[in-house]
Image: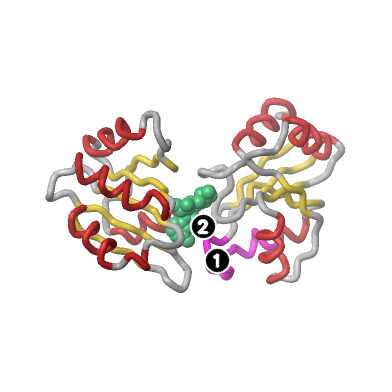
């Protein structure tokens, strides 16, 4: 029986990888990765030399079929993404669902847990985190406003990912629906040199980033406290 490991990798700091993840990356026949250059940097850092196979959001169905054939022939594979836990706002869900559908009795699918930006951000936010609503990346157009309203009405902590490009726009949309007392947290560049976690009401946060436009760079997680 072959195995497909779903391996979490660092979200910035290369030290944030488990011993088990390294052992598995060393042991598999090949590593499926989003951007082979990004994964190579990680593998080189740990002296791991394994074949890599690109699997990303644009990959065709035929690529999935090739991967399924490899598993059928007994190869063990690891799926990683550029950062964090594969399938969490990352390519991979479709592949995992296809492998489950086609090879459920023939292939073990084993998670190898580790970093994920949503969990790291929540853990340091100070907001209730036993229950939360995670929305990944919000859609750019259709349904975006409705989701902001849902977040505003949500009793639980809400979390979403945002690019620097849409960051201020997202904060402005939030300011239209959140009351002045609602707290939000911005987790930027977690585990990296310019890591920063900022909390305040939405007006305070907008002022901070308007006054410090140089900080609208890198990767962001936005957290909104519940009602
Ligand atoms: N699979 C990843 C995970 O488990 O966190 C998420 C991948 S998603 C394509 C990338 C988004 O995650 C970024 O745009 C950002 O919103 C968030 N992210 C990833 N790394 C981050 C970091 N170091 N600091 C803050 N946010 C991060």
Q: Residue at x 53, y 65 (%)?
A: 12
Q: Which residues are magenta?
A: 10-22
Q: Are marks 2 and 1 in contact (CB under 8 Å)?
A: yes
Question: Looking at the image, is mark 2 or mark 1 earlier in the sequence?
Answer: 1
Q: Quadrant location of residue 203?
A: bottom left
- Ligand 1 closer than 8 Å to the CB at disc 2? yes
Q: Which mark is residue 16?
A: 1
Q: Which quarter of the image is occupied by the N terminus?
A: top right
Q: In front here: 174 or 128?
A: 174
Element on which disc 1 rests: loop
**Which residue of the protein is positioned furthest toward the left in this rendering?**
180
Crowding at mark 1 (Cα within 10 Å: few <14, some 14-19, many 20+): some
| CA distance for labels 2 and 1 | 7 Å
Residue at which label 2 appears:
115
Element on which disc 2 rests: loop
Q: Residue at x 54, y 54 (%)?
A: 84
């Amino acid at each position: 029986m072959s195995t497909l490991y779903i391996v979490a990798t660092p979200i910035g700091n290369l030290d944030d990888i488990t011993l088990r993840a390294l052992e598995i990356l060393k042991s598999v026949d090949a590593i499926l990765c989003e951007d082979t250059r990004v994964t190579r940097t990680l593998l080189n850092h740990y002296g791991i030399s394994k074949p890599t196979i690109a699997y990303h959001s644009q990959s065709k169905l035929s690529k999935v079929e090739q991967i399924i054939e490899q598993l059928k022939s007994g190869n063990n594979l690891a799926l990683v993404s550029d950062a964090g836990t594969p399938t969490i706002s990352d390519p991979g869900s479709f592949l995992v669902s296809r492998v489950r559908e086609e090879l459920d009795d023939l292939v073990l699918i084993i998670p190898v847990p580790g970093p994920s930006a949503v969990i790291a951000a929540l853990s340091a936010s100070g907001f209730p985190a036993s229950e939360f609503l995670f929305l990944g990346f919000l859609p750019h157009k259709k349904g975006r406003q409705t989701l902001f309203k849902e977040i505003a009405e949500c009793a639980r902590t809400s979390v979403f990912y945002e690019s620097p490009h849409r960051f201020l726009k997202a904060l402005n949309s939030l300011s239209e629906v959140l009351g002045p007392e609602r707290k939000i947290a911005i987790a930027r560049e977690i585990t990296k040199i310019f890591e920063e976690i900022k909390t305040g009401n939405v007006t305070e946060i907008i002022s901070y980033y308007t006054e410090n436009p140089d900080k609208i760079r890198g990767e962001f997680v936005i957290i909104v406290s519940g009602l």
